[in-house]
Image: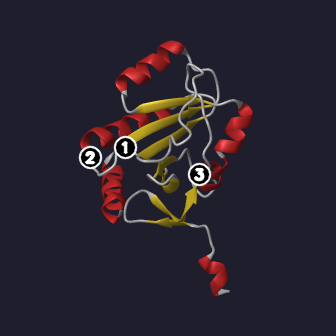
Amino acid sequence: FLGLAACDNSVEETASVGKTLMPPVPLTGMVLVDDQNNPLPVDLLKKQYTYVLLADSACDDFCQQYIALTGKTISQTTVSKPVKQLLLLGYEPEKDWLEKIKQENPAITIAVLTRPIWAIFTLPFSRVASDMLGAPLFLVDPRGFIVMAYDDLNEAGPLTKDLKSLDSKR
């Protein structure tokens, strides 16, 4: 029984709004494409911290809020590795909106996924999200592991606190 508990892939609550994944969830290397249909590096989610936002059919109010909060965190937080934003879209985004988002958020990378790639690449994120309410935001560490998930986030403070805490453990 104790052995089974040790293998549990549960989500643990931390002192902040975020949830620490124990154990962290590894991501597979995969070539994604940007909004111009250019390939992104296979190690896109390694060597830095990355906030990952999933917006399958549209970037709704939660998505817009998470872009703003992660952007604020990135501009106000100093850690040992760079911090980026990755917005995963499963549809053809409207060009003017896309340009506006990229101009307002220089740390953002946008990947537009086909339905088959979406199903494969977002599977680890979906598994974590099934334990949460609402539309989660994810933090991937420099090794390429999902380490934190956030749900119903309204301010950047918890993001900053958790990012500094994770970085100090590296």
Percent x, y of residue 134: 56, 47
Left or right position of 131 against 85: right
Position above or below: 80 against 70: below
Q: CA distance from mark 3 to mark 1?
A: 17 Å
Q: Residue furthest right?
A: 116
Quadrant including the N terminus: bottom right
Where on the picture, by quarter, is residue 66?
Answer: top left
> Residue beneath label 1, please?
83
Which is nearer the N-term, disc 1 or disc 2?
2
Circle 2 crowding by C-alpha within 10 Å: few under 14, some 14–19, many from 20: some
For the residue pair 147 and 72, the one nearer the viewer reads as 147
Left or right position of 7 against 141: right
For the residue labelled by badge 2, is the local secondary structure a helix, a strand or a loop? loop
> Residue beneath label 3, please?
27
Percent x, y of residue 147: 48, 58
Residue name at image x 36 percent, y 50 percent: 159
Amino acid at the residue labelled 1: Val
Q: Are marks 1 and 2 in contact (CB under 8 Å)?
A: yes
Front label number (1 vs 2):
1
Position above or below: 93 against 5: above
For the residue pair 33 and 139, the one nearer the viewer reads as 33
Position above or below: 32 against 121: above
